[in-house]
Amino acid sequence: MPDHAGGCLCGRIRYRLRGAPEFPHFCSCRQCQRSSGAPVVAWVDFPLAALAWEGPGGEPAYFRQEETRRGFCPSCGGAICAIDDDSDAVSITIATLDDPGALVPVSHSYPDSAPAWLRVKAEAPPAG
């Protein structure tokens, strides 16, 4: 199983993930919109035990929002991850992966919170 690596805009926060990715999806909830400044965020889950922080900045800084810690780079502000309390998974922002095209979102959470002008297409990748 291949590793997935990624990091923030400035490169201070870097990570490596081992294991199978799960639940690649778009999210348009108001929390994601406000934390990213975008109408939609693409996420993918991995086992928390599969995550290793490797950059010179170590772990990201965290902002607590209800039962979730949202990880971001304290230097560039890049949104990197979200970890729910009592969860054994970490949600990674797909756009921070070194190869963001490797994972395709297959669903859209909170589509009714997306702006009316936004058109998001989430579907299973072609078989093959």
Image (spheres, grey):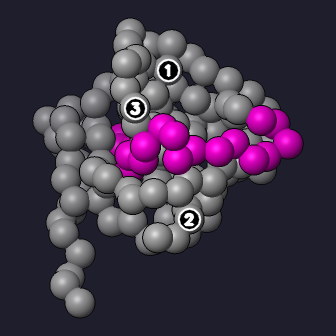
The residue lying at 45 percent from left, 28 percent from top is: 83
Q: Name the quarter where the C terminus is drawn.
A: bottom left
Amino acid at circle 1: Arg
Residue 51 among magenta residues: yes
Residue range corresponding to the magenta coloring: 39-58
Q: Quadrant of residue 57?
A: top right
Give the labeled residue for mark 1. Answer: 69
Quarter holding residue 101: bottom left
- Label 3 sits on residue: 88
Question: Of the residues under marks 1 and 3, which one precedes in the sequence?
Answer: 1
Q: Which element carries disc 2, helix, strand or loop?
A: loop
Q: Single out the mark in the foreground, 2 or 1.
A: 2
Q: Residue lying farthest left?
A: 112
Which residue is label 2 attached to? 3
Query: Contact (CB < 8 A) between labels 1 and 3?
Result: no
C-alpha gap between disc 1 and disc 3 = 13 Å
Q: Tally the marks.
A: 3
CB atoms of marks 2 and 1 within 8 Å: no
What secondary structure is found at the residue carrying circle 3? loop
x, y (%) of residue 88? 40, 32
**Image point (65%, 45%), residue name:** 52
Q: Position of residue 49 (x, y in %)?
A: 51, 40
Q: Which structural element holds mark 1? A: strand
Residue type of the residue flagged with mark 2: Asp
Q: Counting other residues with Cα less than 10 Å from the Cα at mark 1, is it few (<14), some (14-19), or many (20 or more)?
A: some
